[in-house]
């Protein structure tokens, strides 16, 4: 989803650049018979000699700079144009800054695939009453397990593993209320976690429990943090 949003931004940026060229704006590469020159973005990294600003070096007569090869000019211009397309795309695409804005941007009622659906279910059943930070932390624990080598390597296998998540019965995930706001938010959290748009926990945090229980295994682990009603361990 993030890739598709950014691709749309590039398309809009390309349209803006094309329109600017047609109206002889600052992006125009060629005017009349004048050879194209490098865009100003290519000048930022260029070294400035004393002679470049009209002052002679050690009393010598300033020499006119050698003409750049046409291919070099074209490469410089093309690279600068690509840089400006990226800059324009970044301006056009809204960039959510905080987790609340990310949730708003990526929320939805339909998951993108089966694995994301399992992750959204874990968030929904384990943490839908928690703050969004606590929901993201639960999603990160699931993803951390898939990469740990100590648990199954897929999200659905981690979520349905016996005796791990209390909402799962005999390997079956119950039906969530997919028309609810809680589900829409869970989908957003799953997407954010999978994309790595923001992170809260280290990758070695593999366990958590509610603060109103005290499992014996918690004493053998290193407590990392507490978010909402959940305590997280590595």
Image: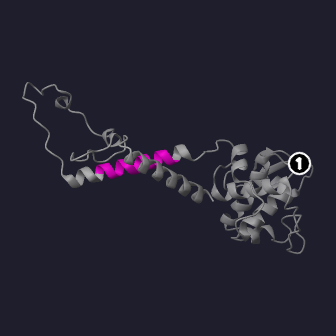
Residue 206, can we see it? Answer: no
The residue lying toward the viewer, choosing from 114 and 15, is: 15
Main SS category, magenta section: helix
Residue identifier under label 1: 211
Q: Position of residue 168 (x, y in %)?
A: 87, 68
Is residue 142 placed above or below 84 in the rendered structure?
A: below
What colour scheme does the image use?
one colour
Give the magenta-colored segment's residue range: 76-89
Q: Is residue 86 magenta?
A: yes
- Say which element carries label 1: loop
Question: How many numbered discs?
Answer: 1
Q: Is residue 214 magenta?
A: no
Q: Is residue 12 found left or right of 157 in the rendered image?
A: left
Q: Position of residue 17 (x, y in %)?
A: 43, 48
Question: Within 10 angstroms of label 1, few (less than 14), some, or many (20 or more) residues?
Answer: some
The residue lying toward the viewer, choosing from 40 and 222, is: 40
Q: Is residue 25 found left or right of 34 in the rendered image?
A: right
Residue 172, by quadrant, is bottom right
Is residue 174 placed above or below 34 in the rendered structure?
A: below
């Amino acid at each position: 989803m993030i890739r598709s949003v950014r691709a749309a931004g590039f398309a809009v940026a390309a349209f803006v650049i094309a329109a600017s060229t047609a109206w002889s704006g600052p992006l125009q590469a060629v005017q009349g018979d004048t050879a194209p020159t490098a865009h100003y973005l290519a000048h930022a990294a260029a070294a400035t000699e004393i002679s470049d600003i009209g002052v002679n070096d050690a009393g010598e007569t300033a020499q006119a700079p050698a003409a750049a090869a046409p291919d070099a000019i074209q490469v410089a211009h093309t690279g600068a144009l690509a840089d400006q397309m990226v800059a324009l795309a970044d301006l056009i695409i809204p960039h959510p800054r905080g987790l609340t804005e990310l949730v708003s941007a990526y929320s939805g009622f339909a998951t993108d695939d089966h694995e994301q659906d399992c992750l959204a279910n874990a968030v929904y059943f384990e943490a839908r009453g928690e703050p969004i930070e606590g929901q993201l932390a639960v999603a990160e624990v699931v993803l951390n397990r898939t990469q740990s080598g100590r648990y199954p390597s897929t999200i659905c296998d981690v979520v349905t593993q016996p005796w791990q998540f209390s909402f799962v019965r005999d390997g079956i995930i119950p039906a969530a209320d997919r028309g609810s706001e809680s589900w829409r938010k869970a989908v957003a959290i799953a997407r954010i976690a999978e994309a790595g748009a923001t992170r809260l926990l280290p990758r070695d945090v593999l366990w958590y429990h509610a603060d109103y229980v005290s499992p014996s295994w918690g004493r053998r682990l290193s407590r990392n943090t507490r978010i909402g009603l959940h305590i997280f361990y590595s």
